[in-house]
Image (spheres, grey):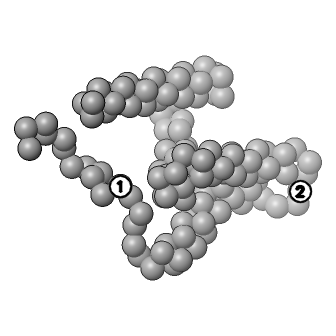
Amino acid sequence: PVLRIRFLAIRFGGVCAGLAGGYLSLVLTPFWSSGMTGGRGWIALAIVVFASWLPWRAAVGAYLFGGITILQLHAQAFGVPVPSQALAALPYLITIAVLVAIMARRRGGTAGPSSLGVPFVPDR
């Protein structure tokens, strides 16, 4: 039942996005401001590319990039003699480096699902 599975997947994605937005605005930063995501959506898209559409690799990528974010916060707390702006940019710089390495290894090809973006029409 393709339509039912797609509907449930979209619903699950919406619930996850709602929970993430609630967490971001209520827990991570307990206030609302414009641009508060700070590029985290870009890293989420990079994780999908890194994972090559495999869920276990997406989990590993999320822990990897999340760990780098926590590492830069701990480095600032321990007084590492590096400017805080450079440490804050570290997750984004490593994301770019990983994407460049993956694309160089694939030689420009993509490994996405063949039916990605193609609407399902039951009549055909």
Mark 2 residue type: Val
Towards the viewer: 61 or 24? 61
Q: Amino acid at mark 1?
A: Pro
Please tell me which of labels 1 and 2 falls first in the chain: 2
Residue located beneath label 1 in the image: 113
Tell me which residue sits at (35%, 55%) in the image: 113
- Tell me if residue 43 comes above or below residue 121 in the rendering: below
Mark 1, Cα crowd under 10 Å, few <14 / some 14-19 / many 20+, is: few
Mark linked to residue 80: 2
Q: Nearer the viewer, residue 93 or 102?
A: 102
Q: Position of residue 70 (x, y in %)?
A: 76, 44
Nearer mark to the viewer, of 1 and 2: 1
Q: Quadrant of the N terminus?
A: top left
Q: CA distance from mark 1 to mark 2?
A: 43 Å
Q: Position of residue 29 (x, y in %)?
A: 64, 27
Q: Position of residue 71 (x, y in %)?
A: 79, 50
**Residue at x 69%, y 58% (from the top left corner):** 90
